[in-house]
Amino acid sequence: MCFTRLLAAALLSIGLCFSQAAAKDMNVGFVYVSPIGDAGWSYAHDKGRLALDKIDGVKTSYVEAVAEGPDSGRVILNMARKGYDVVFATSFGYMDPMLKVAKQFPKVVFMHCSGFKTAENMGNYFGRMYQARYLSGMVAGAMTKSNTLGYAAAFPIPEVIRGINAFTLGAQSVNPDVTVRVVWTKTWYDPATEKEAAKSLLDVGADVIAQHQDSPGPQEAAQEKGVYSIGYNSDMSQFAPKSHLTAPIWDWGPFYVDTINKVKAGTWKAEASWPGLAEGVVDLAPMSEMVPKEVQDKVMAKKDAIKGGAKVFVGPVKNQKGEVKVAAGSAATDEELLGMTWFVAGVIGTTE
């Protein structure tokens, strides 16, 4: 009798241990390059993080305004040491530091946004933002009067160059006379610097300003000058309601939820993910009433075509020197897009 009771107690104890283990929350960490604020890149990723908080058994946290390089490595390492199950690092410059930490913690799942390196426990992901960039370029090309568009660009990496090229091709598709002037800020989030970059573009005749950074500085500069603007990352119309035409935007929620569900189910694999308009990760913000209906209809028709499989970089596509980079009758491959380091004809600026 005594033995039976002891055995029952032991089994109950084991059962409780398994129950407690099963009930353990999955800890998911996010590392952001800029303050979350109320618009921009980190804001968009944080909206995706909040979607994870709705999943039972998932607990999330974040660290914002983390500089690229060694600082990010320390933050990622700290999360791994604290027992995080999954860590998302959301800026290009976090790639090598994350890879280093991933090798030290093989049981943790690491996900890097916008890079190209993977490991057994580290995947990378991005979105085909160039598709939405093309659509925003169509809007800009239709609305310009000076035929000069300005682009406040972040860093001269393939991601940014690809976006500028797509924006230019979109603008040229509705207005062949358009040129796009590029100014590099070498920032992801610096409102003052980015606003000044936009002002320099306005000074040379640009009457539509686009951007690739987090802050609404370029939008504000455009409104102060009385010209149009194209936002980025999230709908920035609240910052420049009299200028903001639309914006290429992100919706990371579905991707993050899918990733965590795969980790929970044990089906996650380290791979490169590149979803686009068709998957809902990228989109175009609602167009302003300032954009004529016929322009909106044309843009939406192109959006449907891209979602259906139409390509953006379709030949002939020439570079600034007039050399054919994508031949007539063909489309740029993903490999060519991911390694893009040249500007299309019609862009004024250098890739340095």
Image (tube, grey):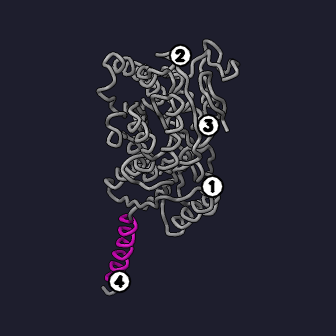
Q: Secondary structure at mark 1?
A: helix
Question: Taking 117 as reference, is 334 above or below it?
Answer: above
- Residue for point 40% across, 59% down: 60
Label 2: how many Cα within 10 Å (few below 14, some 14–19, many 20+): few
User: Which kind of residue does numbered mark 2 sit on?
Assistant: Asp
- Residues packed near mark 3 inside 10 Å, few (<14), some (14 to 19) or many (20 plus): some
Residue mark closest to the camera, 4 vs 1: 1
Q: Main secondary structure of the magenta part?
A: helix
As drawn, 82 above or below 162: below
What's the residue type where badge 4 is placed?
Answer: Leu
Which dot marks residue 6? 4
Distance CA(mark 4)–CA(mark 1): 49 Å
> What residue would you read off at disc 3?
158
Q: Residue at x 48, y 60 (%)?
A: 85
Q: Position of residue 322 (x, y in %)?
A: 69, 18
Of labels 2 and 3, the one closer to you: 2
Q: Earlier in the sequence, mark 2 or mark 3?
A: 3
Q: CA distance from mark 1 to mark 3?
A: 20 Å
Q: Which residue is mark 2?
A: 177
Q: Is residue 307 left or right of residue 130?
A: left
